[in-house]
Amino acid sequence: MKHIFTYTIVALLFFSCAKDQPEVAWLKIDKWDLVANPDAENPQGELSHNLNQVFVNMDGKSLGVYELPAKIPIIGDGAHEFVLIPGIIVNGIGETKKRYPFAEQFKEIITLKKNDTVSVSPKTRYYSALNFLIEDFESPSMQVDVATESTATLGRSSDPEILVWGNKYGDIQLNDADSSISFVTNFQTVLPKLGTEVFLEFDYMNTNSMLTSTIAYGNGNYHENPYVIVAPQAENEAKWKHVYIDLKENISYHQTTPINEVQFTLKLDELGTSKYFYIDNIKLIYP
């Protein structure tokens, strides 16, 4: 009798809690689609991206940030104004989520219905007035300088099993003999400072790590600041990824040093092995 009494209490609590649960509508948000902006003032390059987060506002109130695809429970029904804001993982750190500053919001009136699911596939595009410095390995000459002490080389390849964008990608092969390389962009541009958003982005597939650094020079000064390490992928799991590196603080720190570039440094992670680093669509983006 004691066990029967206990089970009865548990059952009553369960049904009581279930009864008290409010009915919800479900909003299913698929992945972002980054589309071309016909009003772009400058070439924006390939539309590769990893906008895998969404900041959700309903009727002017924040519902939080979600990793995509997401299925969000919402208390209420009827028509509501939704604003979806593209989000990213910054510097490859999963806990660091940020609203992407260079892409438009998605706005739509969505009619919710209790105990039902509404799906939305948001589209976004770059703002029209952005500046892009691009190395996509398509032009005869590359806008990078390879350090003379490098033993490995930065080539261009077109293996159809690896190629995704355009006709070429950057190809670095590392082994005991060719164990290191360092190369620097030579855009020779004054990037905005004073806390202005500046991002380095690129696509990569790799089995070796790589260090990214920022360089500032001019007015008799030269500063090199090691910054973000891109981790290697397992050989049997390597795939193209897109990384967002926030350069705002690095660029703004050296106020009186005008020119800024980005440096990429690779050293063979493990002697006695052969590793690779494929890279494409290097972009510096700023207002």
Image: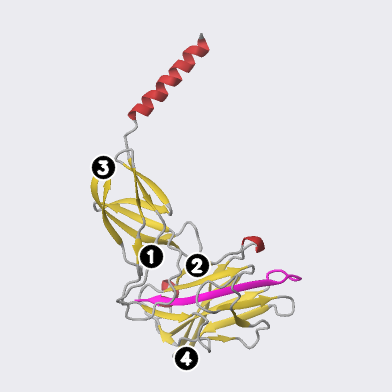
Of labels 3 and 1, the one closer to you = 3
The location of residue 129, given as percent across then percent down, is 31, 77
Q: Residue under circle 4?
A: 220
The location of residue 196, given as percent across then percent down, is 35, 74
Q: Residue under circle 2?
A: 242
Residue drawn at point x = 68 percent, y = 73 percent: 268
Q: CB of mark 3 within 8 Å of CB of mark 2?
A: no
Q: Earlier in the sequence, mark 4 or mark 2?
A: 4
Q: Earlier in the sequence, mark 3 or mark 4?
A: 3
Type of residue at label 4?
Answer: Gly
Q: Residue under circle 1?
A: 100
Residue 231 bears which disc, if any? Answer: none
- Report whether residue 104 is seen: yes
Furthest-right residue in this view: 272
Q: Is residue 151 above or below residue 51?
A: below
Type of residue at label 2?
Answer: His
State the extent of the magenta-drawn residues as a range.
269-287
Q: Residue under circle 3?
A: 77
Furthest-top residue in this view: 1
Q: How crowded is the residue under tag 3: few (<14 C-alpha within 10 Å), some, or many (20+)?
A: some
Residue drawn at point x = 56 percent, y = 73 percent: 163
**SS assignment at label 2:** strand
Q: CB of mark 1 within 8 Å of CB of mark 4?
A: no
